[in-house]
Image: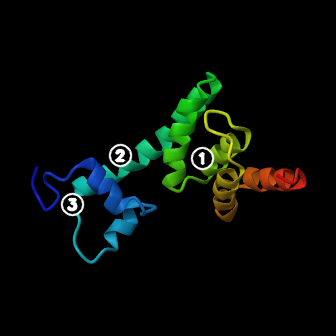
Amino acid sequence: QTGSYAGTSMSDLFNKYSSFNSTSEVDDLESPMSAGLHKDISLIKLNRSSGYSLGWNNYSNKNYYKAANYWRRSALDGNASAQSNIGYLYYIGLGTDEDIAIAKHWTNLAVKAGNKQARINLDIWNDDNR
């Protein structure tokens, strides 16, 4: 590897550039970026979406603990659907401890990001007075 990112771990790159929504945002940075960095950012985005998909795969196979772990990671990365899903799991205590406060926290984040199912869930939960 060559360049200023030689020897930088994928985890370090993820932490530094995970907030970018597209590789074009990297182009807007003041310092020049190598083509290799663009590829690394694309791999990070692929890993984010695959984590969400792995959550669904595990949920479908009734492995709720693993589903919760994948969705929690995706939720931390800002995936609104994962935020809604992990909120739901916390609300009913599936693969997690039941925790209404944490459920509402994640679900509110998803609502703020425009997730419609999260809005529906919150409305139902608020009607339940929990």
Distance from disc 3 to disc 1, alpha carbons, whole Å, reads 31 Å
Frontmost of labels 3 and 1 is: 1
- Asked whether the beta carbons under mark 3 and mark 1 sit within 8 Å of each other, the answer is no
Instruction: Label 2, secondary structure: give it.
Output: helix
Frontmost of labels 1 and 2 is: 1
The residue type indicated by label 1 comes to Ala
In the rendered image, the residue lying farthest to the left is 2
Instruction: Label 1, secondary structure: give it.
Output: helix
Disc 2 target residue:
43
The residue type indicated by label 3 comes to Ser
The residue type indicated by label 2 comes to Leu
Is 108 drawn above or below residue 64 in the view shown?
Answer: below
Q: Which numbered disc covers residue 128? A: none
In the rendered image, the residue lying farthest to the bottom is 30
Q: Viewer-proximal residue, 26 or 17?
A: 17
Disc 3 target residue:
34
Residue 90 screen position, x and y as percent: 66, 43
Residue 32 screen position, x and y as percent: 22, 70
Mark sitting earlier along the chain (2/3):
3
Is 94 drawn above or below residue 33 in the view shown?
Answer: above
Disc 1 target residue:
82
Mark sitting earlier along the chain (3/1):
3
Q: Viewer-proximal residue, 7 or 26?
A: 7
